[in-house]
């Protein structure tokens, strides 16, 4: 049977004002590009969205993951939007397009990618998450809760098809290594790694009983590609739901807790991850707080039915209120840790220059 592929490819190619929002003019360029790609038969279907200054192409096709034609399509679309952004002198025009020409796969070129291929079930609900002003490790805590915490996911206890647990593929993004960790039996080992952000990130999750793909996160680190800070690695993720996977509500539940993530202002501060509707996915105070949207689709014969804007629901109001309160509290720390990132994690810093400038004034204690 033909397998369906969901490819979410995203990039920040310019915004206004500053890093706040990818404007309508860029969305229009991308929409025309993707529309034509459907007509040309490169993809079956798409949904275009934005979260803050990042534009996301949510695409379906039958060509498998890492398909050159689909990646080139995304690259060309972002290129066209970047050209428009340059014409309008938007901020950070072409920010995430780090290479001059396409070389077969957008990985390592700047855009972020989350893709999965599966044989469609009788009914196949998925949720696509898109975040801004944060990094891939922001998904570590929610992925743990969705797939390994029975206090979050009732299905781990009561659904016979979830009960065996899930396998986490964890990447060490500094060393470029990966490891498979089984839950529930290795939960403490898993937590000891993925609690250490941003070194260890959850890349994929599989159902242990049949190795069926359950979730994928984009883990591209821009600074590792560019060799310097060029913007935060605002991530996307795809999660499959129901009938042997966590239910939609179990997948959303972790986001009622606005946990602290890196990426607030200049990619250099921690703030709470605020769940918002598509309409509210516009970055506000202090280039934050970090935001996330959740779009629910049914996958149907290689096409997307939906989306439902899942965080638009009033049941996330308390989380938003909490995120605002936490932002107030964190902001009061100003340049002090833990609001500001540690010296090793800082995307850019004056510290080495200051230590150098003042080195002769340091005396023995
Ligand atoms: P499924 O077993 O079909 O996933 O249903 C569980 C459910 O949705 C209850 O909330
Ligand atoms: P982006 O990574 O979303 O472009 O934000 C960069 C930044 O430094 C915002 O303060
Ligand atoms: Mg930007
Ligand atoms: Mg961004």
Image (cartoon, grey):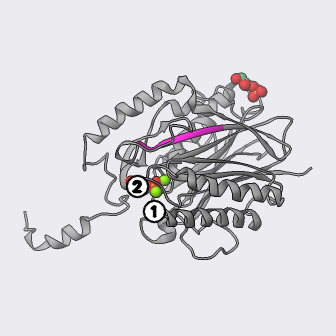
**Which mark, residue 281?**
none
Residue at far right of view: 1
Label 2 belongs to which residue? Answer: 18
Which of 62 and 357 lies nearest the eye of the viewer?
A: 62
- What range is drawn magenta here? 289-295
Badge 2: residue crowd in 10 Å (few <14, some 14–19, many ≥20): few
- Main secondary structure of the magenta stretch: strand
Cβ of mark 1 under 8 A from ligand 3: yes
Where is 39 relative to 240, above or below?
below
- Tell whether position 3 is magenta: no
User: Residue 181 placed where, x, y %?
Assistant: 63, 49
Instruction: Determine the CA span between mark 2 and mark 1.
Output: 8 Å
Percent of width and height locating residue 336:
25, 48
x 63%, y 58%: residue = 29
Residue 260 vertical position relative to residue 63 in the rendered view, above or below: above
* Mark carried by residue 92: 1
- Answer few, some or many: residues within 10 Å of disc 1's Cα (few below 14, many 20 plus, some between 14 and 19): many
**Image location (x, y in percent) of residue 31:** 67, 53
Q: Nearer the viewer, residue 137 or 263?
A: 263
Give left or right: position of 155 versus 209: left
Residue depicted at x 45% and y 53%: 16
Is residue 184 visible in the rendered structure shown here?
no
Q: Nearer the viewer, residue 237 or 147?
A: 237
Q: Is residue 294 on the magenta stretch?
A: yes
Q: Quadrant of residue 41?
A: bottom right
């Amino acid at each position: 049977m033909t397998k369906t592929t969901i490819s979410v490819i995203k990039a920040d190619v310019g915004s206004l004002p500053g890093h706040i929002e990818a404007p309508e003019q860029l969305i229009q360029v991308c929409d025309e590009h993707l529309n034509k790609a459907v007509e040309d038969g490169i993809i079956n279907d798409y949904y275009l969205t934005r979260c803050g200054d990042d534009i996301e192409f949510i695409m379906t096709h039958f060509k498998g993951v890492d398909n050159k034609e689909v990646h080139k399509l995304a690259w060309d679309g972002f290129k066209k939007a970047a050209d428009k952004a340059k014409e309008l002198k938007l901020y950070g025009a072409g920010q995430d397009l780090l290479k001059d020409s396409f070389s077969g796969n957008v990985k390592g070129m700047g855009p972020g990618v989350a893709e999965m291929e599966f044989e469609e079930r009788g009914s196949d609900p998925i949720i696509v998450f898109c975040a801004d002003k944060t990094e891939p490790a922001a998904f570590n805590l929610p992925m743990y809760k969705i797939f390994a915490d029975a206090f979050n996911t009732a299905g781990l206890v009561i659904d016979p098809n979830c009960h065996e647990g899930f396998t986490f593929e964890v990447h060490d993004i500094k060393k470029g290594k990966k490891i498979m960790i089984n839950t529930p039996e290795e939960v403490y080992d898993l937590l000891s790694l993925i609690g250490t952000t941003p070194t260890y990130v959850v890349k994929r999750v599989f159902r242990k009983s049949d190795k069926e793909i359950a979730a994928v996160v984009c883990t591209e680190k821009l600074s590792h590609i560019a060799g310097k800070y060029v913007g935060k690695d605002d991530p996307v993720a795809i999660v499959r739901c129901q009938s042997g996977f966590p239910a939609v509500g179990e997948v959303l539940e972790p986001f009622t807790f606005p946990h602290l993530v890196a990426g607030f202002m200049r990619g250099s501060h921690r703030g709470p991850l605020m769940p918002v509707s598509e309409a509210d996915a516009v970055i506000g105070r202090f280039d934050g707080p970090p935001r996330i949207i959740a779009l629910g689709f049914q996958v149907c014969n290689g096409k997307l039915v939906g989306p439902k804007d899942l965080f638009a629901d009033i049941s996330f109001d308390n989380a938003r209120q909490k995120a605002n309160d936490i932002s107030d509290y964190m902001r009061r720390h100003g340049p002090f840790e833990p609001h500001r990132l540690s010296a090793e994690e800082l995307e850019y810093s004056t510290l080495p220059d200051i230590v150098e400038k003042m080195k002769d004034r340091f005396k023995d204690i």
